[in-house]
Image (cartoon, grey):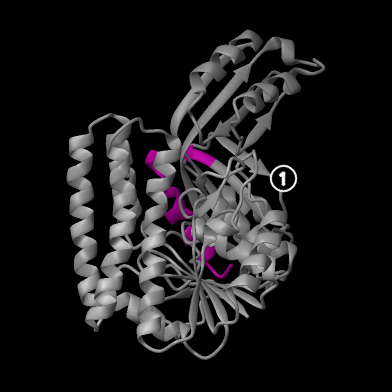
Amino acid sequence: MKVLKFGGTSVGSPENMRAVMKLVTDGEQKIVVLSAMSGTTNSLVEIANYLHKRNKDTARIFIGKLETKYKKVVEKLFETEENKTLGQKVLKESFNTIKSFTSGKFSLVGENTILAQGELISTQLFALLMEENGFNVKLLPALDFMRIDEDKSADQTAIRKNLKKVLKKTGEADYYITQGFICRNTDGDIDNLQRGGSDYTASLIGAAVDVEEIQIWTDIDGFHNNDPRYVGNTKKIEQLSFNEAAELAYFGAKILHPHTVLPARVHNIPVRLKNTMNPSDSGTLITAESDGTGIKAVAAKDGITAIKIRSGRMFMAYGFLKNVFQIFEKYKTPIDMISTSEVAVSLTIDNVWNLSQIRAELDQYGTVEIDDEMTIICIVGDIIQEEKGFASKVFNALDGIPIRMISYGGSRHNISVLVPTSRKKETLQALSDDLLNNGN
C-alpha cells in the first residue's frame, strides 16, 4: 500500500480533481490524503478573522461568496443529478457549520472548526466523484484518528492505534480518502497541524500503517537546487537523504512541510515528491541514503529576527547561557541559529509574538540588540563529501555580502548564514553561480 497526498492546487478545480482521480485509480490499493481546494483555507481564515473582530455582517458576505463558488464547482464536477444533489448536501452541512458561528461568542475552537471545513468538503466531493465513476472507495475521517498532544505535537502512538481501528471498522476498499491538516487535540476539539500540515498527515499515516512509499503531489517536479522564484536555471534534485530534505524543508523550501520527513525516516519509508501537472516525471526521491554528490541545494527562510545579548558578566560566567535559553523556553519560542563569544551571544527566532516580553527579561543580563527583516540562507548537502575547502567556497561566493551570523558544524548537512532580507536574491544568485552551476 502507498499513501498519496495531493495539495490544494492539485484539487483546485473540477478538471484537476478528475486528473487526480485518473492518477490514483491504477488498481493498486492506497490511502489518498487531500488538502482543501486552493484558496479555500485563505478564505476561511479571512472569515474567522472577521468573526474574531465581531464583524459578523462582513463575515456573512464572505461566507456567501465562498458557498456560491462551491455550488458552481459541484455543478461542474458531477454528471448525474443525483450526485449533484448529494454534492450540494455536502456543501449545506459544512456551510451551516460555518454560519453557526456568526451568532454568539467566537473562540479558537470555532476558528479551528471553520478551518477544517475546506478539507471536509474536498474529500467528500472527491470520494463522491470516484463513486460516480464506479470505483470502490471509502472515506476515513481524519478526526477519528489524527491526534495532537498537549504540546501540539502529533501523538503518533494514538494515531497508529486509532487508524488501525478505523480501517478495521471501515472495511476493505481499493481506495481510501482522508483529510490532511485537521485533527483533534487533547480536549477532543477540532484542531490542526498548521499550514502545510497535509504533508505531515500523509507521513504520519504512512508510518502508522507501514506503507511502502509516501508520495507528495504538488504543482512542481520536486526539490530544486535553488528557489526558482528568485534564481534562474535551477535544476531538479533527483535524490536526497532524509536529513538533507529535512534541512531544506525547515529552512524555506516550500514544497515540503518541515515535519514530514521525521515519521518516514524513523520507519525508513521512502518519500517521493511528484508533480500533478507532469506525472511522468520521476520527481525527487527521499530515502535514508544520500547519493554522495556533496552540495545539493540552497534554501532561504524569511521573517527572521536576530537578537544579540552583550554582557561583560558573560565572560567565564557559569550558567549565563542557561538563563538566557530559559527565557525563550518560558515563552515557547524556538531558536533557529546561535553563535557565541566570550562576551556575547547571538541567536535568531522566527516567532516574534512574545518578543517584547523576551527583550524585557533579557535586559537584566546585558545590552540587547535586535535586527528584523533578516533571512537565513542554508546550503545543504552531504557536506562531509566536500569538507576540504567547502567553507572557503561559500565565503568566496558571498564576498561583498554582509553576513550577520554563521552556523557551521551543528549538522553535517548544512551551513547557514544570516543576511538582510534585502540582499536575499543577490545571495541566492551568488551561491547558485559559484556552488551549484560551477561543477559542484
- In the rendered view, does 354 fall on the left or right side of 245? left
Identify the image quadrant of the C terminus: bottom right
Name the one closer to the observer, 379 or 41.
Answer: 41
Q: Residues within 10 Å of mark 1 (few under 14, many from 20)?
A: few
On the question of residue 60 being in view, the answer is yes
- Residue located at (66% from left, 13% from top): 311
Q: Main secondary structure of the magenta part?
A: helix
- In the rendered view, does 366 fall on the left or right side of 17? right
Give residue 438's position: percent from left, percent from top: 52, 67
Name the one closer to the observer, 408 or 289.
Answer: 289
Q: Which residue is mark 1?
A: 410
Identify the image quadrant of the N terminus: bottom right
- Residue located at (19% from left, 68% from top): 72
Give residue 406's position: percent from left, percent from top: 61, 39
- Label 1 sits on a secondary structure element that is loop
- Looking at the picture, does residue 153 appear above or below residue 216? above
Query: How many numbered badges does the structure rendering display?
Result: 1
- Looking at the picture, does residue 81 appear above or below residue 345? below
Residue 199 part of the magenta-drawn span: no
- In the rendered view, does 28 fall on the left or right side of 402? right
- In the rendered view, does 230 fall on the left or right side of 343? left
- Residue located at (28% from left, 45% from top): 99
Under mark 1, the amino acid is Gly
Q: Which residues are magenta?
A: 418-440
On the question of residue 382 being in view, the answer is no
Give residue 320's position: percent from left, percent from top: 75, 18
Name the one closer to the observer, 168 or 197.
Answer: 168
Quarter occupied by residue 339: top right
